[in-house]
Image (spheres, rainbow, N blue to C red):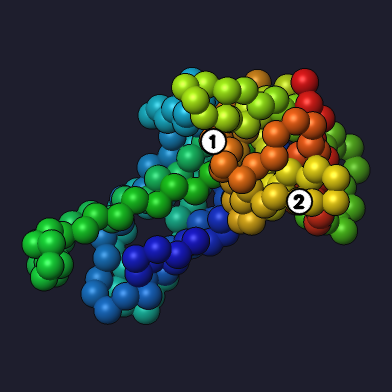
Amino acid sequence: MAASSVLIWPINPTIEAEQKAAALWLENRGQQPVDLQVRVMTWRQGNFDDQLDAQRTIIGSPPVVTIAPGKRQMIRLIATQPAPAGTEQAYRVLVDEMLRPDAQVDPQLGVKFQMRYSVPLFVFGGGAGPEPVSGAKPREGVQILQPRLSYQVRQEGGRRYLFLSNQGPAHARLSKVSLRQGGASTLIADGLLGYVLPGAQMRWQLPERAPSGNFVLEARINEQAEPQPIPAH
């Protein structure tokens, strides 16, 4: 993930049951030192929006860093206690750029910019694990948690929305989303559309060019190599 002068990787960190921590790397590709604060928040979804709350189960160490130009810093995301067995727990790692007293001012706007980066983090309890990267073999004795998605289209306030529900035990990361009707396909999102957490429902406004009537919704879900059809409900 890159924005402003900070590069962050990996963009999808996980802490599996046998692990106590994961590494998150921050790199300063700018010309000035950057001060960053790292916080880990619980992540829920409700009312078609992300909801973040403070917690102490997962902590970032160190919580505040100064990175010189061209240098990088590893942040350890430490689990202070295990996740419940057989479950996936969702968090967001917030990396906030703190303004320095000598920060340069934008000459046109007359303001100093402060950036925020948000990285998803998923933590797995005993006996459960994430879907392996396409082509990789699942580990023995680990139940692979997968989302169970369905969709519907509804009209609200004169606009059409795509509603996606997830009744499975794992999150769904949706990309390469399209609507296929007959021999035609309408692209909704080439890159990331968004996430639907377990037990949640999210919605996205459909573009005017989206077909009406019956169509097939297809999306690349998590680590799948190719888009897959999602059933209507």
Left or right of 75 in this view: 201 = right
Three-letter amino acid code at the position of disc 1: Gln
**Mark 2–mark 1 distance (CA, rounded to whole Å):** 17 Å
Left or right of 71 in this view: 222 = right
Whether label 2 touches label 1, CB < 8 Å: no
Circle 1 residues within 10 Å: few <14, some 14–19, many ≥20? some
Q: Secondary structure at mark 2?
A: strand
Q: Residue at x 70, y 25 (%)?
A: 152
Which of the two discs, 2 and 1, labels the residue nearer the N terminus? 2
Q: Residue at x 57, y 23 (%)?
A: 155
Three-letter amino acid code at the position of disc 2: Ser
Looking at the picture, how far across and down is residue 166, in whole percent?
Answer: 70, 26
Q: Which label was assigned to residue 185?
A: 2
Looking at the picture, how far across and down is residue 72, in whole percent?
Answer: 42, 70
Q: Which label was assigned to residue 26?
A: none
Q: Residue 85: name its quadrant.
A: top right
Q: Residue at x 85, y 45 (%)?
A: 182
Q: Quadrant of the C terminus?
A: top right
Left or right of 217 in this view: 8 = left
Looking at the picture, how far across and down is residue 16, in whole percent?
Answer: 69, 42
Q: Secondary structure at mark 1?
A: strand
Circle 2 residues within 10 Å: few <14, some 14–19, many ≥20? some
Whether 77 is drawn above or below 36: the answer is above
Q: Residue at x 81, y 54 (%)?
A: 226
Name the residue nearer the viewer: 152 or 112.
152
Whether 17 is drawn above or below 35: the answer is above
Whether 129 is drawn above or below 190: the answer is above
Q: Which residue is mark 1?
A: 205
Q: How many marks?
A: 2
